[in-house]
Image (tube, rainbow, N blue to C red):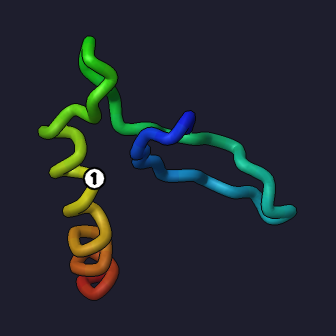
């Protein structure tokens, strides 16, 4: 967005349209919040692990 890094998860419906978008927050200097970004980056591995258990 406007040349800045961004991180988000989009939930799409069957037609391929976004139903919900969840974005990593920003601080007062418009930098991505480190704790949220760390959790965001860990999400794929965490979801893959959960899927293998189910």
Q: Is 6 rendered above or below residue 51?
A: above
- Relative to residue 30, is residue 21 drawn left or right? right
x and y, in percent, of residue 12 in the image: 69, 57
Q: Position of residue 19 (x, y in %)?
A: 70, 44
Q: Measuring 57% from the left and 41% from the top, which residue is drawn there?
A: 21
Q: Residue at x 22, y 39 (%)?
A: 36
Q: Nearer the viewer, residue 32 or 14?
A: 32
Side of 54 where 8 appears, left or right: right
Residue 35 percent across, percent down from the top left: 13, 39
Query: Residue at 35% across / 37% down in the picture?
Result: 24
| Residue on which disc 1 sits | 40
**Residue 51's spot in the image, x, y percent?**
33, 80
- Between 27 and 41, the one nearer to me in the picture: 27
Q: Secondary structure at mark 1?
A: helix
Q: Is 50 in front, or is 27?
A: 27
Local packing at callout 1 (Cα closer than 10 Å; few below 14, some 14-19, many 20+) is: some
């Amino acid at each position: 967005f406007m040349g800045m890094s961004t991180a988000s998860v989009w939930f799409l419906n069957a037609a391929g349209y976004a139903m919900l978008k969840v974005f990593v927050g920003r601080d007062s200097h418009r930098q991505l919040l480190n704790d949220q970004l760390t959790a965001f980056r860990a999400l794929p591995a965490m979801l893959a692990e959960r899927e293998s258990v189910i």
